[in-house]
Amino acid sequence: MYDSIIIGAGPAGLAAAIYASRAGLNALVIEESPVNGGQVLSTYEVDNYPGLPGISGLDLGEKFSDHAINAGANKVEATVKKVETLEAGKRFKVVTSEGDFETATVVVATGATHAKLNVPGEEELAGMGVSYCATCDGAFFKGLDVCVVGGSDVAVEDAIYLSRTCQNVFLIHRRDSLRAANSLVEAASRCSNIHYIWNSEVKKINGEDEVTDVEVFNKVTGESSKLQVNGVFIAVGIVPATSFLDGQLEMNDKGYVIASEDCRTSIPGIYVAGDIRQKPMRQIITAVADGANAINSVSEDLRGNM
C-alpha cells in the first residue's frame, strides 16, 4: 500500500517523485517507457528553463531523472490500463501490465501524445518518412528536402533544427502567420533554406516504402499541388494521454483534466500534473511546478485534510 503512485515520468512526474521523497512519502513511479523524461527528450534545445539556457532536451530529461533516482524514487516500467477507486479519498488500485498496485493517492502525470493529421498515407508511411520528432529522425534526411506541418513553437523549432542538415525545409501552415514565439520566428527567418507555404493543409502523403511527395491544398486559392519531399514532420499539437481514465475525472471538451493550481481533481485522492491539466500554458517549467503542487496537496490530504 503506497502513500502515492505517480503515473508518468516526464518533468511533472519526476518533480512529483522528488518532492514525494523529500516529504518522506512511500511513493512509486509507473512509466511505460524505459527512459524517463517524457516529451522533453525529443526537444533539440531548451532555452527557457531557468539556469540552464541552451541545454538539450535529452540532457535536461537525464538531469531530472538522475535527481529523482538520487532522491530515492522507486520506478516500475509498466503500462497503466486503468485506475479503480476502491474508496474515494482513501484507497485506489492502479491496474497495469505488470500487475496491480494499491495506493492512498494517485498523481496522474501522463502528459500528451502527438496529434495526427489523419490524412491518407500518414499511418501507412509512419517511420518511412512520416515523423513526429525532428530531433529523433532528422539525421535520416541529411541533404534531402522535407516539410514541417504546423505553426507552433514546436513546428518552428523543428524547421530550424532540420534546416541545419536538410537541403530545403518547407513549413506548411494553415494560417497566414505563425503562432510561435517571436524569438523563434526571427531565428527561422535567418535560415535561408526554410520556405513558407501559407494558408495550406496537407491532404495526402504519397509513397510506398518511402515518402515521395505530399498533396497540399491552398484554402485561399482553392488550388491543390504536389510538393516533392522525402520527409514529413508533423507538429500540429498534442492530445492529452487520459484515455485510460475512462472519463472518471471531470475534463474539458478536449480531454484535459479540470484541476486548479493545487492539482486536485473531481475525485478526492486523485491529482493531475503537467500537460494533461487544463491550463493556459504548457511548458516544462509549468509541468515541474504542477508536480510540486500535486505532492503538496497529497501531503496535506494524507494528514487528514481530504
Image (tube, grey):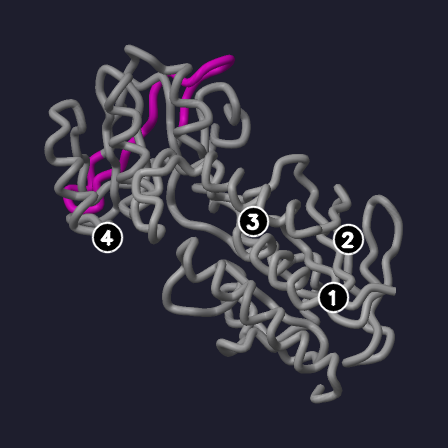
**Marks 3 and 4, how far apart at CA:** 25 Å
Per the image, is 214 magenta?
A: yes
How far, Cα to Cα, is label 1 from label 2? 24 Å
> Image quadrant of residue 131?
top left
Mark 2 sits on what residue? Answer: 81
Q: Is residue 255 visible?
A: no
Whether residue 121 appears in magenta in the rendering, the answer is no
Q: Which residue is mark 1?
A: 25
Q: Quadrant of residue 44?
A: top left
Question: What kind of residue is marked 2?
Answer: Lys
Q: Earlier in the sequence, mark 3 or mark 2?
A: 3
Q: Residues within 10 Å of mark 1 (few under 14, many from 20)?
A: some
**Near-viewer residue (52 or 94):** 52
SS at badge 3: loop
In this rendered view, identify the residue nearer to me: 14 or 209.
14
CA–CA distance between discs 2 and 4?
Answer: 35 Å
The residue identified by callout 3 is 10
* Disc 1 element: loop
Marks 3 and 2: which is nearer the front?
Answer: 3
The tag earlier along the polypeptide, 1 or 4, is 1
Please say if 233 is above or below 249. Answer: above
- Between 285 and 222, the residue placed more toward the observer is 285
Between tags 3 and 4, which lies in front? 3
Sequence order check, earlier mark of 3 and 1: 3
In the foreground, 281 or 61: 61
Taking the view exactly as shown, the residue that stands out farthest to the bottom is: 305
The three-letter amino acid code for the residue at tag 1 is: Leu
Residue 220 percent location from the top left of the image: 16, 46
Which is more N-terminal, label 4 or label 3?
Answer: 3
The tag earlier along the polypeptide, 1 or 2, is 1
Which residues are the magenta region? 205-223
